[in-house]
Amino acid sequence: MSCDELRDQYELYALGVLDAAERAELDQHLHREGDPCIERVQHARQLVSGLALIAPESRPPARLRSRVVGLVSEPKHSWFGVPAWIAVAALAIVAAWLLNTRRIQERTLADARQELSRKNVELAQLNEAFALMNDPAAKQVVFGEAAPKPRGRVFVNPKQGVLLLASNLTPAPAGKIYEMWIIPKGGSPAPAGLFQSQSDGTAMYLRKGAVDVASTGAIAVTLEPETGSQAPTTTPLIVAAL
């Protein structure tokens, strides 16, 4: 066959839908140096790639998808009544839909992995909190009993650290964060970490590390700039005196 006789098969060749005999015929041309079919097939491949990329990333309606899939699934002889560019466009739509489906699946998997990682972190924190609370060496202090908010408990463990459990603690506004302070008897407050409360006003924060319980006068919490402070800049919202 001549190059002119093959011109309607370039896009189908690029899409990989030619049967073995037709593909072999075109392959012979592509192995001939300077054959016009070489440049035309390259152009067809660029066209197919471009159509796949510009197709909208959206899930097609079920009826449209069924019709397109039905079109490209028809026996080989049905292609001869369809212009090549229509066949290419139809296959490009299907290719774009499959690509978008894969991307959605990848995003869903990534979200699931992220959620699993977050749950694992929360579980580890809960295990640490239970271990600290159940240690006989831990000292428990209740705060906010007479006030509507915030209220809760502080556990101070000489080896494991300080655990804060609070409720009625409104989430810190944008640009702000809660900061814990360990206040020694007769000394200046020492920063003990930053945390945020949940949307329901509950908070659990664990400051790990040894604590000299005997020399500690109180555990306090203030509202600070989101980067934290080296000394309290606001009136404490929580004070749990030991």
Image: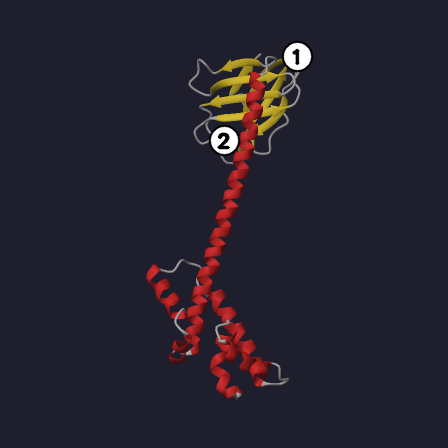
Number of residues whose C-alpha sits closer than 10 Å to that of mark 1, classed few (under 14), some (14–19) or many (20 or more) = few
Element on which disc 1 rests: helix
Label 2 or label 1, whichever lies nearer to me, is: 1
Tag 1 or tag 2, which sits nearer the N-term?
2
Q: Identify residue type, mark 1.
A: Ser
Element on which disc 2 rests: loop
Vertical comparison of 166 with 121: above or below: above
Please indicate, yes or no, whether residue 185 appears anywhere in the rendered image.
no
Vertical comparison of 202 with 67: above or below: above
The CA distance from mark 2 to mark 1 is 30 Å
Residue marked by disc 1:
215
Vertical comparison of 107 with 37: above or below: above
Residue marked by disc 2:
172
Residue 240 is drawn in which quadrant? top right
Whether residue 162 sits left or right of residue 12 in the image: it is: right
Number of residues whose C-alpha sits closer than 10 Å to that of mark 2, classed few (under 14), some (14–19) or many (20 or more) = some
Residue 130 is drawn in which quadrant? top right
Q: Identify residue type, mark 2.
A: Ala
Please indicate, yes or no, whether residue 216 appears anywhere in the rendered image.
yes
In the depicted view, which residue is nearer to us: 30 or 128? 30
In the rendered image, residue 125, in percent from the top left (x then y), is placed at: 56, 28
Q: Image point 55% across, 34% down: which residue? A: 120
Q: Quadrant of the C terminus?
A: top right
Q: Image point 43% across, 76% down: which residue? A: 85
In the rendered image, residue 139, in percent from the top left (x then y), is placed at: 58, 13
Whether residue 238 sits left or right of residue 75 in the image: it is: right
Vertical comparison of 24 with 197: above or below: below
